Image: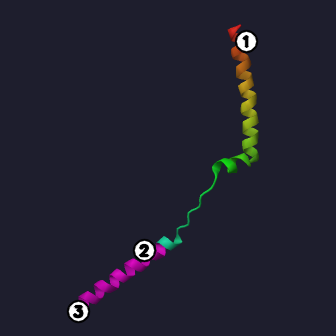
Amino acid sequence: MKEVKKIVVALALIIAATSFVNAQSKIAHIDVTQLLSQMPEMKAAEAELQKLQETYRADIESSMT
């Protein structure tokens, strides 16, 4: 009987601990596209890439003629 009590108490503690751990996890979903579009760094990077694209386009066009 003592062994059964120990097993029941152990199972109760394990179940309680599991539910407590699961209650602590929080998950969020974000729209990464919207987040990046609002960052000033992203706008600066896009401008820099646009300049680089134009430079490469001019180089390719000049090498083809």
The mark found on residue 23 in the picture is none
State the quadrant of the C terminus.
top right
Give the label on residue 62, or none: 1
Q: Position of residue 40 (x, y in %)?
A: 76, 46
Residue 7 highlighted magenta (yes or no) = yes
**58 relative position to 4: left or right:** right
Give the amino acid at mark 2: Thr
Label 3 vs label 1: CA separation?
Answer: 91 Å
Q: Which residue is mark 2?
A: 18
Would you call the spot at circle 3 few (<14 residues within 10 Å), some (14-19), or many (20 or more)?
A: few
Query: In the visual, does 18 lie left or right of 44?
Result: left
What amino acid is at disc 1?
A: Ser
Query: Label 3 sits on what residue type?
Result: Met
- Say which label, 3 or 1, has the lower sequence index: 3
Query: Badge 2 local density, few (<14 within 10 Å), some, or many (20+)?
Result: few
Residue at image location 71% in from the left, 26% down from the top: 53
- Relative placement, left or right, of 23 versus 32 is left
- Which span is picked out in magenta? 1-21
Image spot of residue 11 (x, y percent) = 34, 80
Does the magenta portion include 39? no
* Main SS of residues in magenta: helix
